[in-house]
Image (cartoon, rainbow, N blue to C red):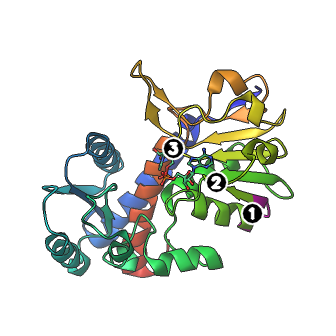
């Protein structure tokens, strides 16, 4: 491996840039941009992610609130709260933490948050803008991956990129962004046959399957670049990704670490989206 694609240096640049945007916003509007995270239930991983988002928002100068409901709360009650937040001019970004209890219909929830405050980029209006290449709020994890690749000057044009996973939150928007950057994209998923025949041809692998250690050296083309989106805790309580790092590291040109790669980029883009939503709603410029 020649290069470890760590987020640290890029995050410190982004932190300075985003903090200065917050200071300007405060000067102009006499308040800080505000992010509200809505959490239903107390899934342990969600509780940790929610508090990380809050801590990072505060570190950059944003106002932040987490609203927590019992897992048994009926969807109508949560929806009412979100409609109230949509109408509140001092709330700029609203995020509904996933996973939600199974009584919630994900196909309905994507319409709840006002598109101008939809900092997770789930509303069909924002998803449509993304696919059409129009300006708008960005899908946090895929855009974080693109920023990381740009920071390390990894060109995508004419490359064959394989995205493993087709979720609405990572895999699908990831492919859209890679396509816009002129990569040729293979979208693999759980029903894909002979996955390693596709990955072994690919210059870039973006792995978001949610399966710890799925990708080992037998899946990679020598000299390829790997972005590992997966996050898991193994039996030794260590945080690991979807890629078996030790197995592939000799083969690859570059790889993201887990932790310290894609995860913190996701939160940084969430903060950027909140600031962007605040500025756009107030001035139409970012
Ligand atoms: P998901 O479960 O919604 O989707 C997983 C996708 O992987 C599915 O489309 C499925 O078809 C595909 N898949 C599953 N097994 C496969 C296999 N054996 N071969 C090929 N494809 C397979 O998961 P998600 O929400 O997209 O998240 C994926 C991973 O990324 C998880 O580990 C999650 O924790 C992590 N994640 C990390 C961040 C971050 O900030 N780093 C953000 C979101 C998700």
As measured in the structure, the alpha-carbon distance from the residue carrying label 1 to the one carrying label 2 is: 9 Å
- Looking at the image, is 86 positioned above or below residue 173? below
Tell me the SS state at disc 3. loop
The residue sitting at 41% across, 18% down in the picture is 236
- Name the image quarter holding residue 99: bottom left
Task: Give the mark, 1 or 3, whose residue is nearer the N terminus.
Answer: 1
Q: Is residue 116 left or right of residue 87?
A: right
The residue under label 1 is: 181
Q: Which residues are magenta?
A: 180-185
Tell me the SS state at disc 2. helix
The residue sitting at 37% across, 59% down in the picture is 22
The residue sitting at 42% across, 64% down in the picture is 120
**Where in the figure is residue 228, as x and y percent of width and height?**
60, 40
Q: Nearer the viewer, residue 15 or 243?
A: 243
- Name the image quarter holding residue 244: top right
**Where in the figure is residue 31, as x and y percent of width and height?**
25, 66
Q: Nearer the viewer, residue 244 or 47?
A: 244
Q: Which mark, residue 146?
A: 2
């Amino acid at each position: 491996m020649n290069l470890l694609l760590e987020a640290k240096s890029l995050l410190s640049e982004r932190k300075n840039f985003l903090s200065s945007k917050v200071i300007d916003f405060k000067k102009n509007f006499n308040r800080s941009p505000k992010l509200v995270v809505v959490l239903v239930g107390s899934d342990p991983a969600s509780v940790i992610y929610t508090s990380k988002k809050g801590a990072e928002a505060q570190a950059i100068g944003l106002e932040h609130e987490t609203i927590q409901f019992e897992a048994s709360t009926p969807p109508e009650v949560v929806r009412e709260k979100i409609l109230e937040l949509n109408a509140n001019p001092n709330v700029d970004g609203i995020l509904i933490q996933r996973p939600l209890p199974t009584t919630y219909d994900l196909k309905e929830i994507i319409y709840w948050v006002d598109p101008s405050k939809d900092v997770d980029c789930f509303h069909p209006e924002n998803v449509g803008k993304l696919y059409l290449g129009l300006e708008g709020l960005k899908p946090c994890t895929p855009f974080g991956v693109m920023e990381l690749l740009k920071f390390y000057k990894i060109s995508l044009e004419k490359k064959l990129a394989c995205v493993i996973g087709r979720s609405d939150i990572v895999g699908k928007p990831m492919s859209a962004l890679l396509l816009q950057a002129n990569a040729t994209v293979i979208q693999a998923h759980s029903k894909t046959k002979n996955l390693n025949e596709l990955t072994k041809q690919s210059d870039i692998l973006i792995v978001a399957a949610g399966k710890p250690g799925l990708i080992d050296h037998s899946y990679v083309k020598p000299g390829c670049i790997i972005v590992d989106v997966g996050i898991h805790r193994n039996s030794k309580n260590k945080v690991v990704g979807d890629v078996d790092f030790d197995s592939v590291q000799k083969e690859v040109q570059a790889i993201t670490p887990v932790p310290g790669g894609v995860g913190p980029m996701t939160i940084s883009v969430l903060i950027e989206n909140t600031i962007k939503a605040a500025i756009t709603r107030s001035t139409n410029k970012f």
